[in-house]
Image (spheres, grey):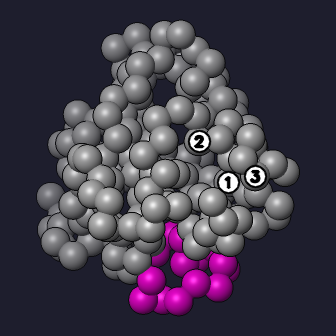
């Protein structure tokens, strides 16, 4: 088992305290409906850019959330959500390898389509509670965000939320990192 550095692990909490973020961002973080639908409704001109979808080792701070012992392989999908050609959210999804197509029938063929559309339209999907964290620059997801050429300061930390979705006995963990460009759209 490889060591886990405490600084690269986020501390996830529920609920989100109001003083930890701006009122504008607080509203986005705590919204319990489909983030995709909210982005489309509030900001328009929405599209998804799939960065990758492949087998990978789960992150140290997500293994327990999906019922795995760290380190273990998962199916991982990372995307950027864009509004008006500006990246506003970095989304990261992990699915245990023992999940099958009967449990998550559309996951493997999503391509550049939104996972949120699939999750919120399926009556068999149940969403767990939201958990929140401020991701520091050394967190693996922040390192991935910085590799996207979004011209962000290297010392930047960002707010993220995650929740566990279940369907037919299988769990899927979705983490959404809210990028600074979202604030440019105002309230």
Question: Looking at the image, do the residues carrying marks 2 and 1 touch, with CB atoms under 8 Å apart?
Answer: yes
Write the residue at 53% across / 32% down: 33
Q: For numbered disc 1, what is the local secondary structure?
A: strand
Residue 113: x and y in percent read 73, 38
Mark 3 surroundings within 10 Å by alpha-carbon count, few (fewer than 14), some (14 through 19), many (20 or more): some
Q: For numbered disc 2, what is the local secondary structure?
A: helix
Q: Earlier in the sequence, mark 2 or mark 1?
A: 2
Residue 144: x and y in percent read 51, 70
Label 2 or label 1, whichever lies nearer to me, is: 2
The numbered disc on residue 43 is: 3
Residue 155 highlighted magenta (yes or no): yes
Q: Earlier in the sequence, mark 3 or mark 2?
A: 2
- Would you place residue 116 above or below residue 53 in this image? above
Label 1 or label 3, whichever lies nearer to me, is: 3
Write the residue at 52% across / 51% down: 28
Give the distance between the C-alpha atoms of the residues marked 3 and 2, in whole angstroms. 11 Å
Write the residue at 26% across / 63% down: 10
Residue 71: x and y in percent read 24, 51
Q: Which residue is mark 1?
A: 81
Q: Which residue is mark 2?
A: 35
Mark 2 surroundings within 10 Å by alpha-carbon count, few (fewer than 14), some (14 through 19), many (20 or more): some
Residue 149 highlighted magenta (yes or no): yes
Quadrant of the image containing the N terminus: bottom left
Magenta residues, start to end: 143-156
């Amino acid at each position: 088992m490889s060591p886990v550095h405490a600084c690269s692990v986020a501390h996830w909490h529920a609920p989100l305290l109001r003083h930890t973020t701006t009122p504008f961002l607080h509203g986005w973080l705590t919204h319990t409906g489909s983030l995709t639908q909210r982005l489309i409704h509030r900001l328009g001109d929405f599209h998804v850019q799939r960065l990758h979808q492949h087998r990978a080792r789960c992150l140290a701070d997500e293994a327990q959330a999906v019922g795995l012992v760290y380190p273990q392989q998962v199916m991982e999908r990372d995307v950027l959500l864009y509004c008006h050609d500006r990246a506003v959210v970095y989304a990261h999804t992990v699915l245990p390898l023992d999940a099958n197509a009967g449990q998550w029938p559309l996951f493997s063929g999503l391509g550049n389509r939104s996972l949120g559309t699939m999750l919120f339209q399926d009556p068999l999907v149940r969403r767990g509670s939201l958990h929140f964290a401020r991701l520091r620059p050394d967190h693996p997801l922040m390192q991935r965000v910085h590799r996207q050429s979004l011209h962000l300061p290297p010392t930047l930390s960002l707010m993220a939320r995650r929740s566990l979705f279940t369907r037919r006995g299988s769990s899927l963990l979705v983490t959404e990192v809210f990028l600074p460009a979202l604030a440019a759209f105002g309230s």
